[in-house]
Amino acid sequence: MPGGTGTIRDLLATGEKSFSFEFFPPKDEAGEKILWQSIRELEPLRPTFVSVTYGAGGTTRDRTVAITGRIARETTLTPMAHLTCVGHTQTEIKSILGSLADAGVRNVLALRGDPPGGPGTEWLPTEGGVNYAADLVRLIRSVAEMSVGVAAFPEGHRDAASLESDIAVLRGKQDAGAEFAVTEMFFRASDYFGMIDRARGAGVEMPIIPGIMPITNLNSIKRMAELSGREVPANIVERIARFEGDPAAVRAEGIAVATELCDELLAGGAPGLHFYTLNRSKATREIYTGLATTV
């Protein structure tokens, strides 16, 4: 059965809680097999949409297009492709959008992307390209009939001068035509709700979906947080580190932490949950099953 042809804008407008998954393009045949097994295992949960990331510097461009297209053709899922500014001219971006449209993809997450040198390094513009996510949103809306989402940052973007200036950037993305946002991973519901308060105060009205990373390995999650210029809160580290030396117990406690966060977010009015699956379905399925509030 072909995938959903709706736009995420319209799906979110129904007011029902959104439940979505994020995947990344695998590097080899073994990874490809794991990815599609995870997609098939998660499909019965009937998520609102699924997204496929875009590698640093556009390195997974063709695979991102191929995977989202296959999801659209071969599953019941609604796919969203990530697209970044890094390393692309406007002409190339338009070509990518054409390829996505031809593949049946109607939803895009518009991101500036990390600098070519990695997170925290100097941004190097591409001649003939665009430098900011808002510019990318504007370009997409000018040439393609797609629903466009953007990133949001509960603790502020690592390069933002202040939380207020970070929200001003989010407002600029909305003004450019963004229709929803998905946050980077975070660990405290208070950070999300604080961002929501700032955003609504600044006139940002679009839905902002919290991004959740299941914690199955403490060292791994610490490294991921560092890439975003963050730290895993000390109370969470302490809670999980008690089980150091027992991987199964560490994983179980990490799943419990993520489930509690999800329940708090949904109870507080979050429009849904977006799970960073790392191409594995088990942890996400366990959290979903453990939720006090059915999505």
Image (cartoon, helix red, strand yellow):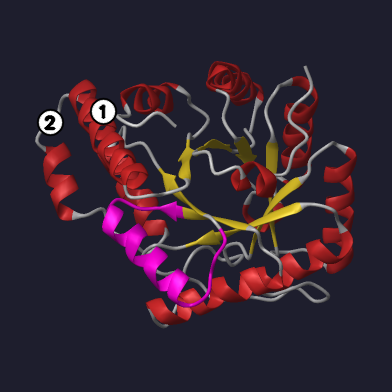
The residue sitting at 60% across, 45% down in the picture is 12
The residue beneath circle 1 is 251
Residue with the mark numbered 2: 243
Q: Is residue 204 magenta?
A: yes
Vertical arrangement, residue 41 with respect to residue 59, above or below: above
Residue 278, given in percent of the width and then of the height, sits at: 49, 35
The crowding category of the residue bearing disc 2, from other C-alpha atoms within 10 Å (few below 14, some 14 to 19, many at least 20), is some
- Under tag 2, what secondary structure? loop
Type of the residue with mark 2: Phe
Q: Position of residue 279 (x, y in %)?
A: 53, 30
The residue positioned farthest toward the left in the image shown: 242
Where's the N terminus, which quadrant?
Answer: top right
Query: Does 260 sit above or below residue 205?
Result: above
Specify which label sits upstream in the sequence, 2 or 1.
2
Question: 206 left or right of 134?
Answer: left
Q: On screen, 118 above or below 5?
A: below
Q: Nearer the viewer, residue 36 or 156?
A: 156
Please say whether residue 16 is one of the residues in the magenta stretch.
Answer: no
Residue 239 shows up from this direction: yes
Span of residues in magenta: 184-206
